[in-house]
Amino acid sequence: MNRIVWNSQSDGPAPQQPAYGGAPRQDQPQYGQYKEPEYGEMASRYPGWNPYVYGAPEPEPSDKGDADDERRNPKVPGGPGNAGDNYRNGIDLDDPAQNPLYGRWDPAAIIAFISALIGVPVLPVLLGAFAIYRSGLFRMKGRALAVAAVIIGLLTTAFDIYVMATGVDPYQLIYQLYGIDMGGSSGSGETSV
């Protein structure tokens, strides 16, 4: 039996002993296995995962002047002086992880656009204005639909008010625009040129 004897004073560092399987210990895990983290080390099994979902620890100030200014005037989410920050009730509306409506279609804009195409007079204007405000605030899709709904709704409403004020039948107005003569004829079979 070949036995390795080691003397710490004369032989230098201890030789690597093979594990029970006979292969030397590897620092890298095999495919499909996870490397167990050292004590105090964060496990990175999910790349890109941020454990600080609800707020990272405050960074240490590098300059003492900045630290004194921060203590005197702390930044409050949604408070005055934070023009670049878009916070509402403590939620950052520019962060897709915190804003559940971020990047989704605004149903109010869709309903306003469809009702404008149908010809409903006032509803697209009101609903479209609400959708413009909401899509800008919550970073939703559909702002262009809402603007189109407001424009079409205003034109439809103005047309309806004109027709009611003049007392003209809408069909007669369309016939006049296209130059179609729908007047009654005497029935004598004569055609006008």
Image (cartoon, rainbow, N blue to C red):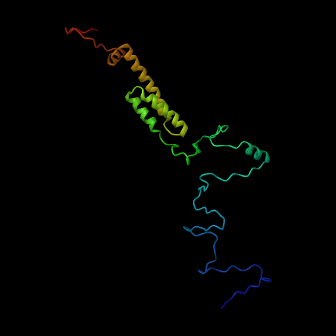
Query: In the orientation shown, which residue stands out farthest toward the front?
Result: 72
- Work out which quarter of the rendered image holds the C terminus and state it: top left
Residue located at (74% from left, 45% from top):
71
Q: Is residue 17 left or right of residue 148?
A: right
- Work out which quarter of the rendered image holds the N terminus and state it: bottom right
Residue 174 % position (x, y): 35, 18
Residue located at (64% from left, 70% from top):
27
Residue 177 % position (x, y): 37, 16
Q: Quadrant of residue 173?
A: top left
Say which of 169 and 174 sits in front.
169
- Vertical placement of 152 versus 17: above or below? above
- Vertical placement of 94 versus 13: above or below? above
Q: Quadrant of residue 91?
A: top right
Query: In the orientation shown, which residue stands out farthest toward the left?
Result: 188
Q: Quadrant of residue 35?
A: bottom right
Say which of 151 and 7 sits in front.
151
- Vertical placement of 88 versus 190: above or below? below
Residue 101 % position (x, y): 51, 43
Residue located at (54% from left, 40% from top):
138
Residue located at (61% from left, 54% from top):
52
- Vertical placement of 101 versus 147: above or below? below
Query: In the orientation shown, which residue stands out farthest toward the bottom?
Result: 1
Q: Is residue 114 left or right of residue 10?
A: left
